[in-house]
């Protein structure tokens, strides 16, 4: 591994840093963006059951809020269930915006790495080409400098793609998951809103 880094030259180090950051972000989002953690199956049913049984108290609302991102959205509605439909909906939407922003945290960073990694690899390629042309001398070509320039160019190009491809795949995957979670939270919140204002029985 050390020999590869030496052959790739100094342009590989920014790529190495980017790869470490990308792996850390992917692992963090894999842990956070789990359906069982974001939208637990029991939360909506429990809230609706308690609401219909008139069992909603400040302590219950706080417990729901702390249970999950979905719980935070539903808790915002429960705190305003005595207000008009418009006020309750507005409170839910405000909480939903905050939750969505938190679910999307670090995704822009991962997307940025996916976008710039090939450019960083291309930069290394340019450095390698400069070294290749620098190996030309009036007395002839320096084989060692020529080989090093080729190594720098190829290793950096390859490493940039190796970072960019999985980063883009996971970026798209996480964006899709967040969008799916947001739709499910909207459906759950709408169901609570309709029940609270008598538009739906169950």
Image (spheres, rainbow, N blue to C red):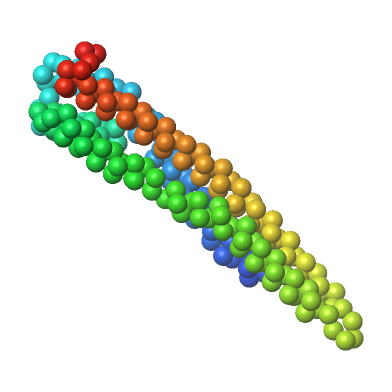
Give the residue displayed 80% in from the left and 69% down from the top. 147
Q: In which quarter of the image is residue 104?
A: top left
Q: Quadrant of residue 157?
A: bottom right
Give the residue displayed 55% in from the left and 52% down from the top. 114
Q: In this view, does 110 lie above or below 78?
A: below
Numbered-mark total: 0
Towards the viewer: 83 or 104: 83
Residue 51 on image: x %, y %: 16, 20
Which residue, as the protein is rendered here, is positioned at the far bottom?
138
Image position of 93 (left or right of 34): left
Image position of 12 (left or right of 64): right
Residue 24 on image: x %, y %: 47, 51
Quadrant into which the C terminus falls: top left
Residue 61 on image: x %, y %: 16, 31
Q: Quadrant of residue 133?
A: bottom right
Q: Is residue 99 above or below residue 110?
A: above
Quadrant into which the N terminus falls: bottom right
Which residue, as the protein is rendered here, is positioned at the far right?
139
Give the residue displayed 36% in from the left and 34% down from the top. 182
Towards the viewer: 12 or 167: 167
Residue 131 seen: yes
Give the residue displayed 21% in from the left and 25% down from the top. 193
Q: Is residue 22 above or below residue 16?
A: above
Residue 162 on image: x %, y %: 64, 51
Residue 7 seen: no
């Amino acid at each position: 591994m050390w020999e590869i880094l030496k052959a790739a030259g100094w342009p590989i180090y920014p790529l190495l840093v980017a790869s470490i950051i990308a792996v850390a972000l992917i692992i963090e989002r894999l842990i956070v963006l789990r359906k069982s953690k974001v939208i637990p199956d029991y939360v909506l049913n429990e809230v609706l059951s308690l609401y219909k049984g008139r069992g909603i108290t400040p302590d219950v609302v706080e417990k729901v809020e702390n249970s999950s991102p979905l719980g935070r959205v539903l808790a915002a509605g429960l705190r305003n269930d005595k207000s008009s439909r418009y006020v309750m909906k507005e409170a839910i939407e405000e909480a939903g915006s905050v939750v969505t922003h938190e679910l999307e945290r670090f995704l822009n960073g991962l997307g940025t790495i996916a976008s710039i990694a090939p450019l960083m690899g291309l930069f290394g390629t340019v450095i390698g080409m400069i070294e290749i042309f620098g190996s030309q001398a009036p007395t002839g070509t320096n084989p060692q400098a020529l080989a090093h320039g080729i190594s720098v160019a190829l290793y950096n190009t390859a490493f940039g793609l190796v970072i960019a491809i999985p980063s883009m795949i996971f970026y798209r995957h996480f964006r899709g998951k967040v969008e799916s979670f947001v739709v499910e939270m909207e459906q759950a919140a709408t169901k609570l809103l309709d029940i609270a204002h008598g538009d739906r029985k169950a």
